[in-house]
Image (cartoon, grey):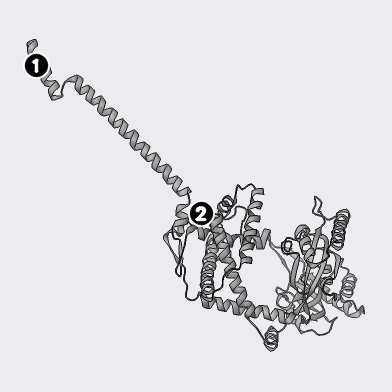
Amino acid sequence: MSASTKKKQRLAAREAGTDKKILAAQKEAELKAKSKRRWTLGTVGVILLVALILFLNSGFLYKNTTALSIGDANYSPAEVNYQYANQFFNLANQYGSYATMMGLDTSNGVSGLDEQDCPMLEEGTWKDYFMDQTMTAMTQMKAVEDYAKAEGISLSEEDIAALDAEFDSLDEAVKTQGYSNLNNFFGTNYGNGVNAKLAREASELSTLVNRTVVGYTEALDYSAEELEAKYESYEGEQDYYEYSYYYVAAETFEDEEGNFSATDESKAEAEKTANAILAAYNELEDEDVEARLNAAIAQSGKDAKCTHTRTAGSSLGTYKEWIMSQTEAGAATVIANDAGSGFYVVAFMGHDENDYNVVSVRHILVQAAADENGQFTDEAKAEAKAKAEALYEQWKSGEATEESFAAMANEHSQDTGSNTNGGLYENVMRGQMVEEFDQFCFEGHKAGDTAIVYGESLSYAGYHIMYFVGEGENCRDYIARADMTTADTQAWIDELVAGYEPVEKIWLKLAA
């Protein structure tokens, strides 16, 4: 082929786009284009993924979708989360460390509840339990809210001011716990989507509902005859019975499988011992029933003391029928336990039919510091007493009013059950408090009387600065009224709720 022919072919190839150099350049350009497209698509994918993460973290779905519908209202997953957490915290705060005895681990807050079996359900977890409680509570709140609107019930300026103060105080408190603000606090502890605005709105609703329910309850009225008839219907179950007892357990023996049980012979021996104590008791003449029973126990060769108690009829044990039938202090008997493996020597001391007035008191508790063994030394008690006396003198040297006492209680009292409401306990019944506290309440004080009394239980030792507020109604009427108002209020709420049914939506899966 001549040179001119080759040249013509190259020119034709260039025009057709098939020249080797052109083909190579085209291929390289195509590879670069593909690479650029892959890079562009990959970048878009990353951007979309980041956007999705940011979208989810923004809480949009938790705040702007519907998890639950009740009546004409729709509730977001965040709103359900808030109420769900409230149910958890209410139970955890009510039972404290005792929650573990119910099988509830509260150490991780609302997290992990779906992994804890709930003994309060035949089958299910604590998440199931709290979600059931949440739906019930939200349904009741919606029904009462609608009732309040229909009746023109609204929050007062004082209610709003109290909520403002509560949230301001909470804002300061959470910062001392390491939270940057209330949004951070609620989001961390109450679940996704929950922030301060949602919590405040929920608190306003809760306050309105409480105001409405309390208003309904306070409007209920019962005649003296109705109250007495209600109390009589308890048939002694609400009365209190004072008695002392000593339990003689039959000796147990281990069998081949490692189980321990009493034999007929050991049961007979335990019954013989119990009857011997009863016989000794009946021969003694000491009018102090407790001392008399202890003396009889000692005569039987036992180095032990009886147990002295005051118990409501509804809580009496194996010897309930016998105790409730007694009228004479000092009567005693022997009663076998349900298994027949032990015997109670029981001595009746008295029957309190609750015919007295309940009282209201304020107090300031100054606790003694426990040592490393959890014991309260005389030095620690003396230090607590000195501090209590100093506070008492400070109060007396000031205005010395109930209001100033309440302010001091809020500032200094170590009783977490009353140091946010001025140390106030209302409608106190006999035997409700530790012995010395109880004695002050029912030794005939008039309004404004004060004193310092010692108090001790399994959990604390210390001194109570007492302020007597006054007497309330007869205890029998108080017990009957409380039961009747509770029942009638619940019946009213049940009637309101009858027309409401919570409807679960797809976004409920985001809640809790």
**Circle 2: element type:** loop
Disc 1: which residue: 8
Left or right of 308 in this view: 491: left
Q: Name the side, left or right, on which 298 lies relative to 46.
A: right
The spot of residue 238 in percent (x, y) is 72, 79
Residue found at x 83% / y 65%:
400
Return the residue nearer the eye: 163 or 53.
Answer: 163
Relative to 103, is 324 above or below? below
Task: Examine the rendering and report whether any part of residue 37 can be seen.
Answer: yes
Extreme residue in the bottom direction = 225
Mark 2, residue position: 193
**Image position, residue 210 (x, y; %):** 60, 70
Q: Residue 86 in the image: state x and y as whole percent.
A: 58, 61
Asked if one can make out residue 126 in the rendered structure from this viewpoint, the answer is no
Label 1: few (<14), some or many (≥20) within 10 Å? Answer: few
- Residue 486, compared with residue 30, is above or below; it is below
- Between 468 and 115, the one lying in front of the other is 468
Q: Quadrant of the N terminus?
A: top left
Residue sitting farthest toward the top: 3
Residue 364: image location, x then y, percent? 80, 62
Residue 212 vertical position relative to residue 65 in the rendered view, above or below? below
Earlier in the chain: of badge 1 and badge 2, it is 1
**Hey, which quadrant is residue 488 in on the image?**
bottom right
